Image: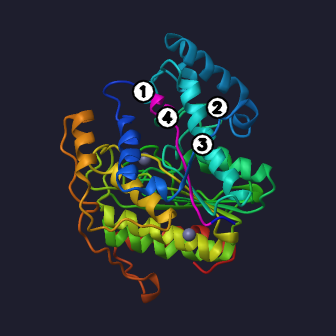
Amino acid sequence: MSGRARLMWDDAVTGYDFGDGHPMDPVRLALTMGLVRAYGLDAAVDVRSAGAAGESTLRLVHREDYVDAVRAASADPKAADQAYGLGTVDDPAFAGMHEASALIAGLSVGAAEAVWRGESEHAVNFTGGLHHAMPGAAAGFCVYNDPALAIARLLELGAERVAYVDVDVHHGDGVQAAFWEDPRVLTVSLHEHPRTLFPQTGWPEETGSGAGEGGAVNVALPAGTGDAGWLRAFHAVVPELLADFRPQVLVTQHGADTHFEDPLAHLAVSLDAQRAVMTACHELAHAHAEGGRWVALGGGGYAVVDVVPRSWTHLVGIAAHAPVDPESVIPASWRDEVYARTRQLGPGRMTDGRTPEWRSWEEGYDPADRLDQAVRATRRAAFPLRGLLP
Ligand SMILES: [Zn+2]
Ligand SMILES: [Zn+2]
């Protein structure tokens, strides 16, 4: 197995563009790739494109009538059918919508194939992670669900156990829905509580059904949760589940919208903590996934200059076994690029200068603490279904 990580990229991904004023500005992808290059990380990975996901691949998750509706909206945005979530405020239709969405999906599927076939131990597609798309509808800025498609492709290739860990600030609802009854896929999502944030799902009691009962795990974090709570919750839930499940592949989603500067949500996580969770996911892949197989995806993130590029550049560095020093001063060439593209001044350092610390769950919990209540609710609802102590 190659030690060299794969980075999926195609300049055409910036065609995934809902238009002026939409929070998901594709400049975030261009600036991330620019920062990856400014650090020379593109030389530490195999940068590859992949074809757009074709009809048979999209159909692994999405309904035929929905794919047809996306194609129609893509050809004539004015004809978008809102019954499919298209042409809405969250998912405005745009020319080329099908092609751009299928390309991003193809990059995640390509990442999964490379890892499954042993061409790369780790593969990153930070342009993906569009976890809200449903089998029959666009939702939450997501048209095709590339994480679900990557997982479905792994199952098609013969995988029997795939773990999905989603640390985006929003619930990974579309991925959970795609594998709700499938015991081969364990989905774990840590997110801001559904009472205060879209998509208003991701309650601890959502645990899957039928043969997939216990296959969905949800941690609903109180608004305002910061580094210590976020890391405590992650470590109180994720490592134990992965050690028990022993996935053949670990797929992770690293939406950067947990950050305290993110305009669309209410957690208070720093880049330092995001980087710590990425490092933990990498270590967990080596510890528990067969052959260290790890597919890492992007996701949400709406502080498009100040947060997203730094967050995902760390992800690429970690997957490349060439982590970027948190103290590092950002190359001036990239800050020039930021100014040229956005007329904003880019950040000067690679993190927020915090030292993330958290208390281990094994040291006990405080029944009056809201974060601890959230973790307990998750463990009580889901762990016994998997034969684990709550
Ligand atoms: Zn999000
Ligand atoms: Zn590694």
Q: Residue at x 34, y 35 (%)?
A: 23
Q: Is mark 2 within 8 Å of ligand 1?
A: no
Q: Position of residue 107 (x, y in %)?
A: 60, 42
**Quadrant hosting residue 103:** top right
Q: Residue at x 64, y 74 (%)?
A: 288
Residue at which label 3 appears: 107
Which one is in front, 300 or 52? Answer: 52
Which one is in front, 343 or 252? Answer: 343
Secondary structure of the residue carrying numbered label 1: loop
Residue 136 marker: 2
Measure the alpha-carbon separation of dots 4 and 3: 10 Å
Residue at which label 4 appears: 13
Q: Position of residue 377 (x, y in %)?
A: 50, 69
Labels 1, 3: front one = 3
Q: Residues within 10 Å of mark 2 (few under 14, many from 20)?
A: some
In this rendering, is residue 129 above or below 117? above
Q: Residue at x 47, y 47 (%)?
A: 299
Residue at which label 1 appears: 18
Amino acid type indicated by mark 2: Gly
Measure the alpha-carbon separation of dots 1 and 4: 12 Å
